Structure formats: C-alpha cells, structure tokens
Amino acid sequence: MGSVARITNLSARSEKSFDDAVAVGITRANETLRNVTGAWVKDQKVEVRDGKITAYQVAMEVTFVLDDQ
C-alpha cells in the first residue's frame, strides 16, 4: 500500500541561529500536523539593526504523510 504526503509552507524566526529557527518551525509544525516526515529549507535571511544581526528567519516546506482512511 502506498502513502500520500502533503507539503505546507512555514516561516520561522529565532534570535539565536538559523538552526534554532528551523527547530522552532518543526516544533510548531508537530504541534499542529501529524506524521511530519521532513522539511526543506528554501530560504534564509537575517534581520540587521545597527550593523548587527538581531534575528534569523527561514522559509521552509514541511512534509507530512496523510492518515489512511
């Protein structure tokens, strides 16, 4: 039997690092979605204030497998 997956776009932000922003996004996705199996980080950017990085942001696609009916 095969499976069907769905992809949703998320944006996540952290003041620590890109890795933390990804973790924040995955943690939040797991609170809402079931069967999360992976993510593709599509874009990264930083927020800068007074010449210093103040936050890290990632745009990602999260994949989750749909439940069998």
Image (cartoon, rainbow, N blue to C red):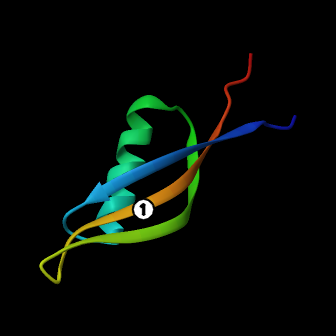
Q: Residue furthest front?
A: 50
- Which x, y percent locates residue 52? 16, 81
Q: Residue furthest right?
A: 1
Quadrant in the picture for residue 50: bottom left
Residue at left 53%, top 64%?
A: 41
Residue at left 20%, top 68%?
A: 16
Q: Quadrant of the C terminus?
A: top right
- Which x, y percent locates residue 26? 42, 50
Q: Give the residue type at disc 1.
A: Val
Q: Nearer the viewer, residue 34 or 62?
A: 62
Find disc 1 in the rendering and name its residue. Answer: 58
Q: Is residue 22 above or below residue 25?
A: below
Residue at left 57%, top 37%?
A: 35
Left/right placement of residue 41 relative to residue 26 reads right
Say what secondary structure mark 1 lies in.
strand
Q: Nearer the viewer, residue 42 or 20?
A: 42
Q: Is residue 58 above or below residue 37?
A: below
Left/right placement of residue 15 relative to residue 23 reads left
Give neighbour class at mark 1: few <14, some 14-19, many 20+ (Cα, 10 Å).
many
Q: Residue furthest top?
A: 69
Q: Is residue 22 above or below residue 44?
A: above
Q: Nearer the viewer, residue 57 or 30?
A: 57
Q: Nearer the viewer, residue 53 or 61?
A: 53
- Which x, y percent locates residue 28? 36, 41
- Which x, y percent locates residue 45? 39, 70
Q: Quadrant of the N terminus?
A: top right
Q: Residue furthest bottom?
A: 51
Residue at left 33%, top 60%?
A: 21
Q: How many tags in the picture?
A: 1
Quadrant in the picture for residue 53: bottom left
